[in-house]
Amino acid sequence: MVLADLGRKITGALRSMANASVIDEEVLDAMLKEICGALLASDVNVKLVANLRKNIKAAVNFDDMASGLNKRKIIQKAVFDELCKLVDPGVKPFQPVKGKSNVLMFVGLQGSGKTTTCTKVAYQYQKRGWKTCLICADTFRAGAFDQLKQNATKAKIPFYGSYTEADPVIIAEEGVNRFKAEKYEIIIVDTSGRHKQEAELFEEMLQISNAVQPDNTIFVMDATIGQAAEAQARAFKEKVDVGSVIVTKLDGHARGGGALSAVAATNSPIIYLGTGEHLEDLEKFATQPFISKLLGLGDMSGLIDM
Amino acid sequence: MFSFFKGLASGKEITKENLAPILEKTKEALVTKNVAAEIADNLCASLEESLIGEKVGTFTGVAGRVREALEAALTRILSPARNIDILREVQHAQTQGRPYTIAVCGVNVVGKSTNLAKLCFWLLKNNLRVLVAACDTFRAGAVEQLRVHERCLNESFGVDGEDGVMLYQQGYGKDAANIAADAITFAKDARRDVVLIDTAGRMQDNEPLMRSLAKLVKLNNPDLVLFVGEALVGNEAVDQVKKFNQALADYSDQAHPRLIDGIILTKFDTIDDKVGAAISMTYITGQPIVFVGTGQTYKDLRKLNVKAVVQSLIK
Ligand SMILES: Nc1nc2c(ncn2[C@@H]2O[C@H](COP(=O)(O)OP(=O)(O)OP(=O)(O)O)[C@@H](O)[C@H]2O)c(=O)[nH]1
Ligand SMILES: Nc1nc2c(ncn2[C@@H]2O[C@H](COP(=O)(O)OP(=O)(O)OP(=O)(O)O)[C@@H](O)[C@H]2O)c(=O)[nH]1
Ligand SMILES: [Mg+2]
Ligand SMILES: [Mg+2]
């Protein structure tokens, strides 16, 4: 499943170190080489991988290490901690307030999974008893409103959009005002896909954001993205105040490492993982279980006991 | 006497040892540019194999020689043997009194429909009459999306469907292979020049959907099967093209199955100099990048500039 390949390679590297008779710099370097290779093959940003290597080396200082210490455990813990750091910016995720209108705005690159994920998130909230709705502020992609409409109808979620209005700022504002007046609690705004190279599209995103004043801006990134992820994520963060990340398409074969790099670039926590095309295919994200799952549950107990 | 001069002129011999740190750096540079790690490894391995034992002049140095060899290798990968000249092939089909057919395929939202519309724009510009077959009967809004393109494209050329583009659709839920077949028959009767077959996005591991793609290709035997891939995609690029080819081969039950003939590399405008996906996809398929998608308007379809891509990679 999720990042299975990466997990296998990392646990493999940890295990081969554990099997070495003497643990010294050379063994550590060999292990780090394997782990870093695995991370790069999973699209984790090259700079982040270099940092991770540096930090683990700094945490494991052979000269200062008293002879009685368990080197294996120290190294394993350093690896575990650094992997956690990769996906956890140490920022608390946004919590919507019951009885209040919470506006969530979805942004991201073309085709990252915004529209699909919007409905999934809305569906989750609705199921848990929140009064939820969807707004289509994408007037760009042909058929975008039909897509949202068909999804929302399937999930029985009220929606707002327009076939004739060409300005997404107006639609977003009208929709949010209407749903606020009707005391909706979770108001989700879907926007067009865009990228940092096109200034006009970025400006439009800022205008939508200014118009709807989102309580949380959610950056959606798909798990197949490679080394271009970091620059895009950083640019989105700089333009609108991204507060959360959702990584989609983590089902199947995807590597996910590029998308994980968005955490560092936006300094925002991952809140959900998208794991399929259907309405229910959304998992809540939590760092420790994610990393322990990544490394295979068996090895987890040994790492966590430290 | 001779060997003395040769020694003077050629300086250093390339060894495994003096090559290793340079190849390490080369690999990292390629991965930074979004070349899949596996392919960066392969490339470096073949550089090693071809360079060890070579003598290099003091001016070039080992690093310079590696760079030279890398540039040549990358250029080779991006310039595959087959040259696809669509307009000429369309003409040829016309002489046979049949429409030329192109099917696009790929994973979800890489830009199949949008770039199919751009392709249509280019064909209309060349005064060809196009039929678009709506064979994505799965994703919400897919048919309406093509309907919008049909309208906009005809408007932008000031023509009606008859002289421009027509949409052939049977709504949602039906079997894509059969719709494509019906569309081609329709196109033949209506004397369209080109049929563009839009298909649903599918993940390369989804067996039922991959089978249905193989069925569509086998049943309709399009003149051109184009794989649409995002320039944004990282290591997954390798798996995508491998498995699309694999599925076309395995599920067709033919001795000589149709495979990917060429690639449309989309969202090239979103990656700055991280152009590595171009290498990953051509390296695996051995097929050319026929078009590059460089934006979201109809005009944003280009030919690949091999030289520029190679320069970005070795910069
Ligand atoms: N397998 C899988 N597919 C997904 C997931 N999330 C989204 N998709 C698919 O990805 C495709 C694109 O999703 P959309 O929601 O249309 O993407 P978008 O970001 O709204 O696209 P634009 O509006 O064009 O920018 C669709 O085919 C979805 O079914 C996921 O978690 N897993
Ligand atoms: N920046 C940029 N965006 C593109 C390009 N090509 C397509 N897009 C965008 O990518 C998104 C998806 O495009 P579609 O053409 O609908 O993709 P698709 O592969 O048909 O998607 P599905 O049918 O859902 O699998 C849209 O938002 C397009 O505008 C391109 O070359 N550059
Ligand atoms: Mg959308
Ligand atoms: Mg499509």
Image: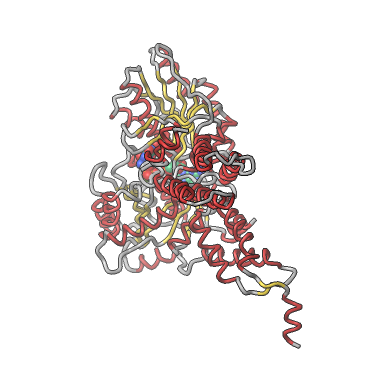
Relative to A276, residue B292 above or below: below
Could you say which quadrant of the image residue A121 lies in?
Answer: top left
What colour scheme governs how the chains and residues are painted in the rendered image of this protein?
A: secondary structure
* Horizontal side, residue B295 vs residue B207: left or right: right
In the rendered image, residue A1, in percent from the top left (x then y), is placed at 35, 43
Which one is nearer the viewer's eye here, B180 or A216?
Answer: A216
Could you say which quadrant of the image residue A246 lies in?
Answer: top left
Could you say which quadrant of the image residue A51 lies in?
Answer: top right
* Horizontal side, residue A140 vs residue B307: left or right: left
In the rendered image, residue A225, in percent from the top left (x then y), is placed at 48, 44
Furthest residue toward front: A68
Which residue is at a point 59% across and 64% down the rendered structure image? B70
State which quarter of the image contains the N terminus of chain B.
Answer: bottom right
Residue B147, visible in the rendered structure? no
In the rendered image, residue B25, in percent from the top left (x then y), is placed at 62, 56
State which quarter of the image contains the C terminus of chain B.
Answer: bottom right
* Horizontal side, residue B143 vs residue A233: left or right: left
In the rendered image, residue B98, in percent from the top left (x then y), is placed at 31, 63
